[in-house]
Image: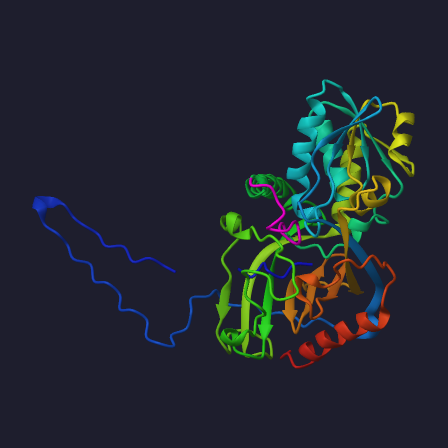
Amino acid sequence: MDRRQFLGSTALAGLTGCARQVKTVATPPAPAAGALPTFDPVPKLAPIRAHTDRIFRVTVCVRPFRAAGPRLDVERVGDKTVVHNYGHGGSGWSLSWGSGALAVEKAMATGEREVGVIGCGALGLTAAILLQRAGAKVTIYAKERPPEVRSARATGSWTPDSRVALASAVSPDFPALWEKMCRYSFHTYESFLGMSGNPIEWTDRYMLSDDSPSGGGFGRARGGAQPGELDFAHYQDRVADLTPRPQVLPPGSHPFPTRYARRDTGLTFNVAGYSRQLVNDFLVEGGKLEMRELHSPSELSALPQKVLINCTGYGARALWKDESIVPVRGQIAWLIPQPGVNYGVFYKGVFMLARRDGIVIQDGGTKGEMEGYNDSSEQPDRPAAEAAVKVAEELFGRMAR
């Protein structure tokens, strides 16, 4: 999960031009030192019922990180044309539509109108639907389908540059390509807003601190790797126009027990409902889903389609023997959903996000973006999950009712 998402008014002078007369408009005085920042009122927020006995499951997701960014090239395997679409790190859901559009364009350029998709996660489902919209007849081949796929265990936040690449390893044109994928995806998500079940919705998130922000209370500032860290690429500034600017909330203006708070607004994916929506959309349009496990590229010869889009995520490391994929482990404790609670909080390294399908609690650890790096274990750690929930319990135990 990525917590780098927490990213005035202008006085206008008027001129009246009758007979060259100028009307002087007084300029408002500059705010005095210590004046409150401009912010919107915070609505009444119900505390999250964060108790360890409300954990109904603990899941682990291994994200497929590639230093050079997602693999999006075309390869010939025997008589098959394979368009690769995997290796998005923690940005799979966020970039899925834009990445899928690039893959579909390459697949349809072959002239084939029967196309297979390997994988039924975030990337596979979106690529399959985009193929259908382009006029193709599509079959998805997958070992698993939602909710068993790895991407079904994601935190559900819009994080389009979360460990998507290393700044020193990408090609010169990758930042522009990333922006293209990001904007395409974002505008596609707009079409899901307001749908039954709220598969996609805007929610507020609050970054909280007991310490002064100027002293690093909101976490380490962006900009350059720290000693022992890799230089993960950060591109959010390229699309800053897509989301509202964060607002610093002065002490006493918010219901949290911390002195300092900052709020931003972002997209939330209610993954259970959203995944079901995608599967239904695909099947309604005549798509076929065949459960099949592939162990090597040579097995593609048994598939009838001549063109395939490979959306196997972390599974591509074994299937394609792609050692460029590095696992990045992330664990979530799931709390029972609370009606009326639909916001997120980041406090003491723990991220909490209330979704329709559960309240996800993720401990970001102490290693920053290196947390979980090169850890392929998918075994849940219950004590660590409970420790993260206890951080939330302590916070909301102090919150005014």
Determine if the magenta segment contains residue 170. Answer: yes
Based on the displayed image, in which of its 4 quarters is residue 100 positioned? top right
- Is 326 above or below relative to 263? above
Closer to us: 63 or 288: 63
Q: How was the colour assigned to the protein in this rendering?
A: rainbow
The residue at the point 60 percent across, 79 percent down is 257
Q: In the picture, which quadrant includes the N terminus?
A: bottom right
In the picture, measured across the screen, residue 6 lies left or right of residue 311, that is: left
- Is 73 above or below relative to 152? above
Q: Is residue 30 visible?
A: yes
Closer to us: 199 or 248: 248
Based on the displayed image, in which of its 4 quarters is residue 123 positioned? top right
Q: Position of residue 374 (x, y in %)?
A: 77, 58
Q: Position of residue 2 (x, y in %)?
A: 65, 59
Q: Is residue 50 visible?
A: no
The residue at the point 75 percent across, 19 percent down is 112
Based on the displayed image, in which of its 4 quarters is residue 208 positioned? bottom right
Q: Say how many tags the image has.
A: 0
- Residue found farthest to the bottom: 398
Q: Position of residue 125 (x, y in %)?
A: 76, 38
- Residue found farthest to the top: 111
Decide whether the magenta segment is chiefly helix, strand or loop: loop
In the picture, measured across the screen, residue 68 lies left or right of residue 336, that is: left
In magenta, the rendered stretch is: 160-172
Q: Position of residue 401 (x, y in %)?
A: 64, 78
Closer to us: 16 or 310: 310
Determine if the magenta segment contains residue 149. Answer: no
